[in-house]
Amino acid sequence: MSYGSSKRQMMEKNKIRYLGLGGIVGPVLFSASVVITAGVRTDYSHITHFISELGATGTPTEEWMNFVGFVPSGILIVLFAIALLTFSKKKPMAVIGSVFMMLFGAGMAIAGLFSCDQGCIPNGSLESLIHDRVSAVTFISAIAGILLSGFSFNKLSFFRKFWGFSLFTGLVSIVLLAIMINSFESRNLTGLWQRLLLLFLFLWTSRIGIHIFKNTEQIS
């Protein structure tokens, strides 16, 4: 291998490594935005309120939550998914899983561009309806992406040790999503269930992101 070819390969690996960090930085940025914006809202509860209510139209935390939280965090998750895609080795399930993770990130960003109405009430304005539909697709895409990636990891040596963790995360996330949806009418612990769901999704992107960052250079 020539020096030039070796240098290009090293640059490509470094690019993938740093894209993988999106799976860590995105969740950290989003979580920090939630904590900070909720901290200035005396009327807000992490237990009962949706996270989207922090970015609802007309609220004092709208711009921070949407343009420091949702949008950049979503873009970072997309970058992480691009890094994940580079390891697919043309395996259909791995490719589809990575694409679903891209949809997860894109959905987060779009949810920040289209705010829900205050209270995130159902059947609100057109912008709020778009937010609600996109949010639903976002969660489903994340879970589908994790499960498909998990199944494909069993055939990818670089990720093989994470296939069980991925399937566990996906199955727990399905249960939490179902519980969260079931709480919509009563709004009993809805915020708690949503945060637990995001915790599992973000733990997965962070763990895989750390693995990509720490081990990509070792690939020949």
Image: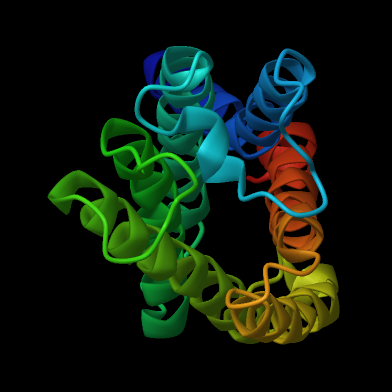
Q: Residue at x 43, y 39 (%)?
A: 118
Tell me where residue 96 sits by quadrant.
Answer: bottom left
For this rendering, which residue is in front, 190 or 79? 190
Give coordinates of residue 3: x percent, y percent: 46, 15
Horizontally, residue 66 falls left or right of residue 51, namely: left
For this rendering, which residue is in front, 132 or 159? 132
Give coordinates of residue 126: x percent, y percent: 14, 52
Horizontally, residue 114 falls left or right of residue 169, namely: left
Q: Is residue 81 above or below residue 32?
A: below
Tell me where residue 216 sits by quadrant.
Answer: top right
Instruction: Inspect this view and state whether residue 155 appears.
Output: no
Residue lying farthest left? 126
Number of on-image labels? 0
Give coordinates of residue 6: x percent, y percent: 49, 23
Q: Residue at x 79, y 81 (%)?
A: 172
Instruction: Inspect this view and state whether residue 179 appears.
Output: yes
Give coordinates of residue 22: x percent, y percent: 58, 32
Horizontally, residue 138 falls left or right of residue 43, namely: left
For this rendering, which residue is in front, 69 or 218? 69
For this rendering, which residue is in front, 37 or 156? 37
Q: Is residue 118 above or below residue 189?
A: above
Q: Residue at x 73, y 55 (%)?
A: 191
The C terminus lies in quadrant: top right
Q: Residue at x 71, y 64 (%)?
A: 190
Q: Is residue 100 above or below residue 80?
A: below
Tell me where residue 75 sits by quadrant.
Answer: top left
